Image (cartoon, rainbow, N blue to C red):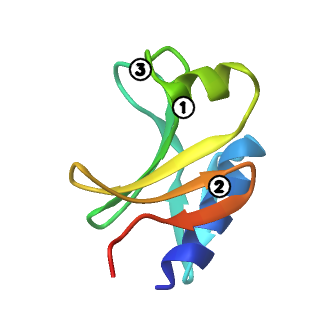
Amino acid sequence: MDLEETALRIYEAMFADEESVEVDGEVYDIDLTSRAKVKRVQIDDLAFLEQNPKKDSHWAEEAREGHQIMWVLRGRKYLARVRNGRFLDLRKE
């Protein structure tokens, strides 16, 4: 699985208000987190998570301003960010 390609595909589906997304021939639901009610896709140990606009952070402020932001996490580690359709790899080489 190519992380950038997968993240962009999920990002596009998430912000197009799709209910599911196909990745590598598998269909994954786009569901809402239980507490924050933000969109999430879980693929194995990777979580693709919409930025919560209700948080007190720079990124939440951007989301409130209308920017579309999605994070890619493994556990609590941020691997990548997609902001307004642009992928940024946050992993250290």
**Comes first in the chain, label 2 or label 1:** 2
Disc 3 residue type (three-letter):
Ala
Disc 1 residue type (three-letter):
Trp
Query: In this view, which residue lies farthest toward the left?
Result: 75
Task: Identify the disc placed on residue 8.
Answer: none
Task: Identify the disc placed on residue 59.
Answer: 1
Q: Secondary structure at mark 2?
A: helix
**Residue for point 42% across, 64% down:** 90
Q: Secondary structure at mark 1?
A: helix
Question: Where's residue 37, x and y in %?
Answer: 47, 23
Q: Residues within 10 Å of mark 1 (few under 14, many from 20)?
A: some
Q: Which residue is mark 3?
A: 36
**Comes first in the chain, label 2 or label 3:** 2
Disc 2 residue type (three-letter):
Tyr
> Is 55 situated left or right of 22 in this image?
left
**Residue for point 33% across, 82% down:** 93
Q: Which residue is mark 2?
A: 11
Question: Where's residue 5, x and y in %?
Answer: 61, 77
Question: Where's residue 58, x and y in %?
Answer: 52, 27
Q: Nearer the viewer, mark 2 or mark 1?
A: 1
> Against 24, is 28 above or below?
above
**Residue for point 70% across, 61% down:** 86
